[in-house]
Amino acid sequence: MPIRHPHRSLSRTLLIALAAGALAGTASAQTERRWRNPATGDWGTVGNWVSNLPPISNETAFFGLNASVTSYNVTSAINRTTAGLNVNNQRPTFLFGSPGAPATYTISNFVTIGGANSPVATLGRGNVIAPANVMVGRNPGQPGSLVISGPESIWSGIDTIGQAATGEVSVTNGGLLSSSRAIFIGFGAGSSGLLRVDGANGPSRVQMLSNAFVVLGTDGNGRIELLNGGQMSVNNEQFYVGDRGTASLLISGAGSSLTLPYQLRLAENAPSVATATIQAGGSITAQ
């Protein structure tokens, strides 16, 4: 089978797409609805928003008016839709629906998670559908983290983890991350990205669907860790550990697995430095 290198042109394409997303985010910022305080509350309670209006489908939900490292819950019994989600300098945990009956949150335009004090967005329950421009650690000096935790937590859509800063995505306690788009981990020079899938407390999984491929360390530092039974499957033949940056893949623990349709590629282009470690019962399967 011939070896192709589509990620070179797609890296440039991604920059154009992210620039378009940035413009869309700027437009949406004109109709931002800002969570009033870093404290637990219901999405639908008007007093929880500075404008006394919750965001609607063409507006952006913004969490970061007051910087805080205290975690708090944002609940919603019903489905929600916004154009954007911006988690900046706060640590909300989103709980959509009720136990046994998760609700859906659709974000049509963009998601950015990052800020000066390392904000964390946690999905504790619900189905998040994000069809475009999901960026964790997007801007220089603004690291961020996304946590997908629990068997009723499904997040669909991811683009960059560590675009120009430090970005981390953790899938834990039986959560699921899926995407049909290419994912870049450690994209820009000076960035650092980590995708961690930990199956210690449930079958946590990542599914890359359709033609979605994976690139670790485009020009930054990209890492994937599959731990304690954490699993990842990729349908596209392209899985690059090290493009031009540094990259590492760790698969550790019984049941931890990476399933590929073709082969793993290490240190694809100079001056990349890349490592892959499979230990303690971890495995790679190339179909």
Image (spheres, rainbow, N blue to C red):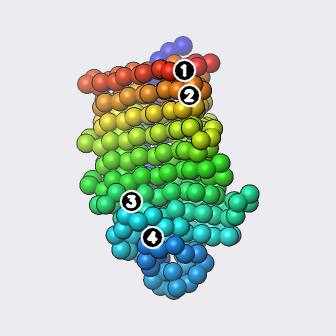
Q: Estimate how packed mark 4 is, as few (under 14), some (14 to 19) or many (20 or more) residues with alpha carbons within 10 Å.
A: many
Asked whether 222 or 42 is in front, the reply is 42
Mark 1 and mark 2 in contact (Cβ < 8 Å)? yes
Q: Which of marks 2 and 3 is nearer the N terminus?
A: 3
Q: Any mark on residue 45, and which?
A: none
| For residue 176, above or below residue 105 | above
Q: Alpha-carbon distance for marks 3 and 1?
A: 34 Å
At x 38%, y 59%, the residue is 119
Numbered marks: total: 4
Mark 4 and mark 3 in contact (Cβ < 8 Å)? no
> Which residue matches tag 4?
62
Q: Earlier in the sequence, mark 2 or mark 1?
A: 2
Residue at far top of view = 1
Q: Alpha-carbon distance for marks 2 and 3?
A: 28 Å
Residue 58 relative to residue 29: left or right: right
Which quadrant of the view contains residue 184?
Answer: top left
Mark 1 and mark 3 in contact (Cβ < 8 Å)? no
Q: Estimate how packed mark 3 is, as few (under 14), some (14 to 19) or many (20 or more) residues with alpha carbons within 10 Å.
A: many
At x 37%, y 64%, the residue is 69
Q: Nearer the viewer, mark 3 or mark 1?
A: 1
* Secondary element type, mark 1: loop
Residue 246 position, x and y percent, is 31, 30
| For residue 252, above or below residue 11 | above
Q: Where is the C terminus found, in terms of image quarters?
A: top right
* Secondary element type, mark 2: loop
Q: Which of marks 4 and 2 is in front?
A: 2
> Which residue matches tag 1?
281
Q: Earlier in the sequence, mark 1 or mark 4?
A: 4
> Which residue matches tag 3?
119
